[in-house]
Image: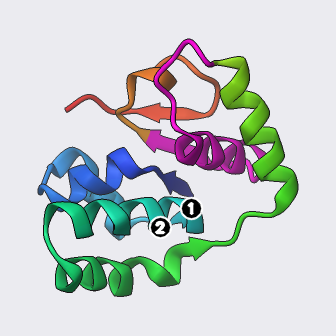
Amino acid sequence: MYCLDNYALWEINFGNKKFSEFLVSDFVITDWTLTEFYRGLLKKYNKQTADYWFNKLKQNSRQVNISVLIRAAIFQHTNKKTDMSLFDAVGYIFSLENDIKFVTGDKEFKHREGVEFIQK
């Protein structure tokens, strides 16, 4: 099982085969990641495109409880010298708590425990 981050979703959207293979495997995304991706799609494209991806991914979305959110806020604060977003910190902590590989190409996570780092 894998947990995809926003970086991975964008690469899937752009047709990057290194990431697209995860759509046919067991994967989840946090509701925070889905929200961040939706917002980005609205900005780059339009509501129709955002709705398309939302409908495609919503069955894989998982709610994040408050304890994960607090741990993610602490994790992001502890790593404040990086360019890590709170959305990404939430996905990473969710992955660790659920013993799921966190899939990203985001450099802030390259050498972290539990990460499947994929370069473009």
Q: Position of residue 53 (x, y in %)?
A: 29, 77
Task: Verify CB contact (< 8 Å) between mark 1 and mark 2.
Answer: yes
User: Which element carries disc 1, helix, strand or loop?
Assistant: helix
Q: Which residue is mark 1?
A: 32
Q: Is 99 located above or below residue 13 in the figure?
A: above
Give the percent coordinates (x, y) of residue 32. Answer: 56, 61
Mark 2, residue position: 35
Front residue of 63/46: it is 46
Quarter of the rendering containing residue 18: top left
Rendering coords of residue 63 (x, y %): 69, 71
Residue in view at x 23 percent, y 57 percent? 12
Q: Is residue 63 left or right of residue 2?
A: right
Give the residue drawn at x 27%, y 77%.
50
Q: Within the image, what quadrant is residue 51 found in?
A: bottom left
For this orientation, the residue located farthest to the front is 43
- Amino acid type, mark 1: Trp
Q: Which residues are magenta?
A: 80-103
